[in-house]
Amino acid sequence: MTSPSATAAVTVLGPEALRSWIVEHQDLVVIDVRSAAEFDAMHIRGSYNVPLPLLSEHTDELASRLGSRVVLVCQSGARAEQARQRLGASGIEGAYVLTGGVPGFAAAGGDVVKGKGRWDLERQVRLAAGSLVVLGLAGGKFVSPKVRTLAGVIGAGLTFSAATNTCAMGKAISAMPWNKAAQEPTRESAILALPVSEAKPAPAA
């Protein structure tokens, strides 16, 4: 049986370990907390899409349906870690975060389903933040020194985002029309669709 580590406190799982777990453990539940559009673009075969905002709104209800072996995935691991912390507060202490996210799993030869190609949310955030900083610096030089304030505001926002492990810009961008899937997950289609497991947390790897 593949184990991420001999240390019980470990909360991360590598792509190769997840590949083994998918084969070895019938009770495994993989939850993708990215947006529906990102999920549609590429996701791990058999995973469930419960976007982070939906998970945050119904954490206790989701936790009540999960068993002892849960892996949370996103694009890089940041949103999955937020989800792990929320589920931990609801009693799911054995959830793991996939290192490298879905792209890392695909690069390791994992079985993924690919759909329409589009930029992932984190890449869009980097583009938006970088563009606003450049705009602020250019505007400060050619329009008014006061425009440089924009760069400072973006810098402060990114610092706050890192300190709190949240991203207001990401939430705003995820609401844009091009980031909307044909059908967004709901409590009924995402959370209540999960099978109820009788096995409860504290997996022994």
Image: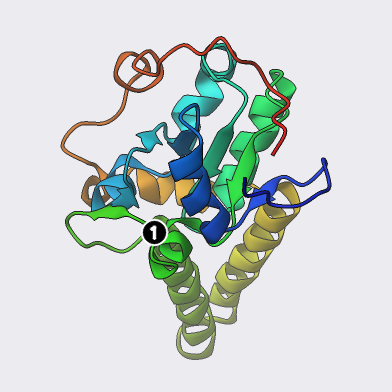
Image quadrant occupied by the C terminus: top right
Q: Residue at x 66, y 29 (%)?
A: 86
* Left or right: residue 188 compared with residue 75: left
Residue 167 shows in the view: no
* Left or right: residue 181 compared with residue 186: left
> Quick one: 37 or 71, which is closer to the camera?
71
Q: Secondary structure at mark 1?
A: loop
Q: Residue furthest front?
A: 1
* Left or right: residue 38 compared with residue 62: left
Residue 48 shows in the view: yes
Q: Residue at x 68, y 49 (%)?
A: 3
> Quick one: 124 or 67, which is closer to the camera?
67
Q: Residue at x 64, y 36 (%)?
A: 84
What x and y, as percent, mark residue 197?
51, 13
Q: Residue at x 62, y 49 (%)?
A: 2
What x and y, as percent, mark residue 174?
37, 46
> Quick one: 185 or 45, which is closer to the camera?
45
The answer to which image quadrant residue 108 occupies is: bottom left
* Left or right: residue 205 compared with residue 43: right
What x and y, as percent, mark residue 69?
59, 31
Q: Residue furthest bottom?
A: 141
Q: In this figure, which residue is indicated by the disc labeled 1? A: 110
Instruction: Check disc 1 and give the amino acid type.
Output: Gly
Image quadrant occupied by the N terminus: top right
What x and y, as percent, mark residue 196?
46, 11
